[in-house]
Amino acid sequence: MTKIEETARNFDFHGEALDNVFEDYAKLRSGCPVGRSEKYGGFWFITKSEDIFAAEQNHETFGVAPSMMFPPVCDRPLPPIDVDQPEHTAYRRILLPLFTPKELKKMEQPIRQAAQEQAAMFMAKGSGADASYGYARPVPLQIFSALAGFPEEDWSKFDQWMDDILYERIENPEKSEKATAAVFAYFDNLLEEWVDDPESNTLIDYLCRAEIDGKRLTHDELLRYCYLIFLAGLDTTAWAIRAGIWHLARTPEDQQKLRDNPDLIPMACEEFLRCLSPVQAMARTCLKDTEVRGQKINEGERVLLVFGAGNRDEDVFPNPDKIDIEREENRHLGFGGGIHRCLGSNLGRRELVVGIEEFLNVVPEFTLADPDQKWHGVGPLNLNF
């Protein structure tokens, strides 16, 4: 077996595999852009940006059921991301009014206030404090939980549930399943107690009032939708903010450049999303026999669209592995593409930009307390300043 065949056969994108995944991406793009891994029961993977974008647009060939998450985080499909057309559009349309530019503008002050409050509390802990649990995680928790309508007294439970579901499901599936059951039980109770208040327009309100073909969502549909927004709204943005801070902590010249030129922060954040994306891959199911770069993929086989590899494609991005905070052409896949592009992308992007802005405004020059701290996930990120 050649080295590239071995890399393809053992390709993984979870846990410790992320430590060196960028090297694997480069090998696969050049030597096996479409291949098959034996992990998790076997799956095909696509690593080139052009092919990933094409697959994202071709939902007649690449469906999302049973789950875009691989392995799944739930044994039931989560609307709208795990639902194919035509039902997908109806589920997605429910929450679109909450993510318009007009609604996002209303969120600007709450986002900035949350970031300022959390940055001040982080600073109060002194040098060596954890910027992940002390800043990157509580900022989106505060913002999104208020938007969703999760009672504030419950927020303290969310971090552990999120960690157990997303970061334990490979090595400790029983722990992950227990946390999933706890989250479903939580939303079961929350939905049972819901009262239609005309003055309230949270995500939960929109879901509970929503109709598809003149019918309200069933209780089970509501539970699955709530479970999805819980995971999607909290983890990905926390990861993105942490990753941006991680890069700036180990790259003092970029940190100073953003302090001197804060107008560059939105551009820098797009580069963080390209190179250090929270969503490294999403799965599809082949709905009919097809071929990609000469590789035949059979109907029913699982296919991984490796966004993280496409985001570092040398045919699209000059010097692709360099985090260039002034990169202007940046058609990345940080939020996916096609009809399944992240519904909350504009909110997540704004939280990231404001999160980096306010951190730099409040925290003086900072460096990694431990240079071995990883780029990925939402684990500790201790900083000296």
Image: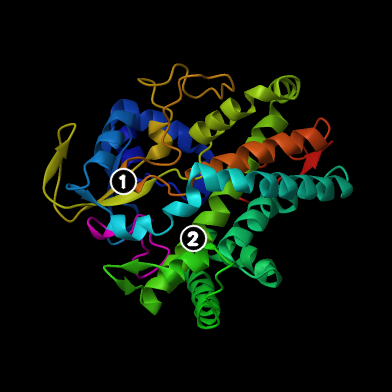
- Asked whether residue 85 is drawn in magenta, I would say yes
Secondary structure at numbered mark 2: helix
Foreground residue among 322 and 329:
329
Foreground residue among 154 and 377:
154
Foreground residue among 227 and 144:
144
Q: Which residue is mark 2?
A: 229
Which span is picked out in magenta?
67-87
Residue 13 point in image, percent of width and height:
43, 46
Residue 316 point in image, percent of width and height:
37, 21
Tally the marks.
2
Looking at the figure, which quarter contains the N terminus? Answer: top left
**Residue 377 seen:** no
The answer to which image quadrant residue 163 occupies is bottom right
Kind of residue at badge 1: Ile
Q: Which residue is mark 1?
A: 339
**Counting other residues with Cα less than 10 Å from the Cα at mark 2, is it few (<14), some (14-19), or many (20 or more)?**
some
Residue 26 point in image, percent of width and height:
40, 28
